[in-house]
Amino acid sequence: MKRILLAAGGTGGHLFPAFALAEELKRRGHEVHIVTDERVDQFSGEAPVDAMHVVRSATLKGKNPLALFKTAYALWSGILQARKLLRKINPDFVLGFGGYPTFPPLMAAGQLKIKTGLHDQNAVMGRANRLLAKRVDVIATSFEEVKFLPETCLSKVRLTGNPVRQKVLDVKDAAYPLDADGQFAGPFQILIFGGSQGARFFSDFFPAALAELEEEVRSKISIVQQCRKEDLDRVQTLYEYSGIKARCESFFSDLPQIMSQSHLVIGRSGASTVAELAVCGRPAIMVPLPHALDNDQLLNAKNLEKAGGGWILEQKNITMTGFHKLIHQFIAEPTGLQKAANAAKSIGQPDAVVKLADVVIDGCD
């Protein structure tokens, strides 16, 4: 039995692959710990681990000397805290999934001569991972080409894909929901969500845009939408007023199941979302996060769009007219959606978690 420590930022994009790997390592009989930040609270019930730990960290922002000093102090405190944790756990391997909460445990592991690795979920290497890339023993990637991956690190790169949770693997073989004639058996099912933290834009634009459709079209649509708590009432009310059947909640524990029952997904294009869409084989309208420093979500989305599995609508350019045109197209020709679903599935990597687990266990030796 090996003892593995997984380090990840506290958002779903970093934690979901870590949880997926933890599930696989636990199946193999290994002990698994996760270290992250306080944002993990909303996901803690999903963590299949022996223990979860929180260490201090901070994100590098701006060039203000006082802010930089506070960040450096927080990271140094986190490294000291992580050293104490690592001495207590004594792991055989530490794997980081990105985000600045990864930085203190990986730095501490290097100081203590513990084997280390990174997994990067995106088509653009994250900033924390870039800082750590030259210090670790192995780097696992989700894409064949990763922007900002240091050339000096290419010899230690292993292409594994991005692990998805068991809940996603459980529905990966669900057939695309059309009837024998290639038509919607019931309403046109649309799932809308803006990432694990929700998105104000999704609550503002899409309900209003759908409400502006013709009554005949609105009557054929059914919506499941994740909203921030503060947006729930107004979004649900707008759907009810426009005659669109809708279920709005702030969090869905069964999101993969809902995805498998949907004809179309509308969402951001974080790495975990794109990986889950591909494994499930569901077409998507992707609205990449517009303020990401390195445009990682846009590059993630381009991989799915290039395969024919989705459509990119950049937030700065999105219009009701363009969105309505797509909805009319989908309702008129549902088989076009099924074709996109098959294209998405063609690039899915359901065995990514097995490959990554192999990399970790090999790295322990």
Image: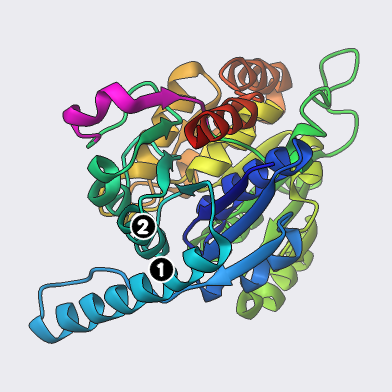
> How has the structure been colored for display?
rainbow
Apparent side of residue 322 relative to residue 337 in the rendered image (left or right): left
The spot of residue 34 in percent (x, y) is: 58, 59
Q: Is residue 250 above or below residue 323?
A: below
Which residue in the structure is indicated by mark 1? 83
Apparent side of residue 121 relative to residue 193 in the rendered image (left or right): left
Q: Nearer the viewer, residue 96 or 217?
A: 96
Taking the spot 63% from the left edge, 36% from the top edge, the residue there is 276
Residue 198 visible here: no
Taking the spot 32% from the left edge, 42% from the top edge, the residue there is 136
Q: Nearer the viewer, residue 265 or 273?
A: 273
Type of amino acid under label 1: Arg
The spot of residue 148 in percent (x, y) is: 22, 37
Q: Is residue 122 above or below residue 96?
A: above
Distance (Cα) linking label 1 and label 2? 8 Å
Apparent side of residue 274 relative to residue 178 in the rendered image (left or right): left
Element marked by disc 2? loop
Q: Nearer the viewer, residue 344 or 312?
A: 344
Q: Is the residue under label 2 in contact with that under label 1 (CB below 8 Å)?
A: yes
Q: State the residue lying farthest toward the bottom.
A: 66
Element marked by disc 1? helix
Q: Is residue 138 above or below residue 228?
A: above
Residue 116 visible here: yes
Q: Which mark is residue 188?
A: none
The spot of residue 263 in percent (x, y) is: 74, 33
Taking the spot 78% from the left edge, 42% from the top edge, the residue there is 167
Which residues make up the magenta segment? Answer: 149-161
Which residue in the structure is indicated by mark 2? 112
